[in-house]
Image (cartoon, rainbow, N blue to C red):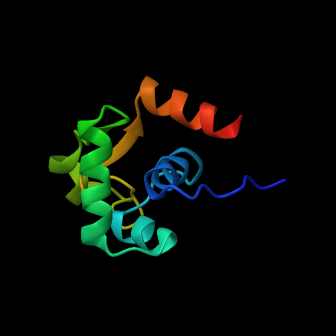
């Protein structure tokens, strides 16, 4: 059974990060129905409150030689991960 979608937009972002797998900011914004700029503000808010953290790719200098460069989720060199606080917030939302 699919999870119910949260009414809080920030919780929706946390849920998308948790369940959607790695994807670009553009794809995530489209999925959530918000602009990229709105999503960036939401991500910044969540990060400043300790719910998520940015994971910066260490392979950028090697991307040009990589055969997966066209499909790699790190092509924008970073992605977001939930912190322990973020995982707790998702668990609380499920209750």
**Residue 39 location (% of width, % of height):** 32, 63
Q: Could you say which is closer to the camera, residue 61 or residue 11?
A: 11
Quadrant in the picture for residue 66: bottom left
**Residue 16 location (% of width, % of height):** 53, 54
Q: Could you say which is closer to the camera, residue 4 or residue 1?
A: 4
**Residue 80 location (% of width, % of height):** 36, 44
**Residue 69 location (% of width, % of height):** 33, 61
Q: Residue furthest right?
A: 1
Q: Residue at x 37, y 59 (%)?
A: 67
Q: Could you say which is closer to the camera, residue 95 or residue 14?
A: 95
- Residue 55 shows in the view: no
Q: Does 74 sit above or below residue 27? A: above
Q: Quadrant of the C terminus?
A: top right
Q: Residue at x 24, y 70 (%)?
A: 37
Q: Residue at x 48, y 47 (%)?
A: 14
Quadrant in the picture for residue 47: top left
- Residue 35 shows in the view: yes
Classify residue 40 as left or right of residue 8. Answer: left
């Amino acid at each position: 059974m699919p999870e119910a979608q949260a009414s809080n937009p920030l919780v929706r972002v946390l849920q998308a990060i948790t369940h959607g797998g790695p994807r670009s900011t553009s794809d995530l914004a489209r999925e959530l129905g918000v602009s990229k700029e709105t999503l960036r503000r939401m991500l910044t808010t969540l990060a400043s409150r300790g719910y998520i953290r940015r994971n910066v790719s260490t392979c950028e200098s090697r991307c040009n030689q990589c055969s997966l460069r066209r499909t790699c989720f790190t092509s924008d060199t970073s992605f977001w991960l939930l912190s322990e606080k973020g995982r707790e917030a998702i668990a609380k939302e499920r209750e």
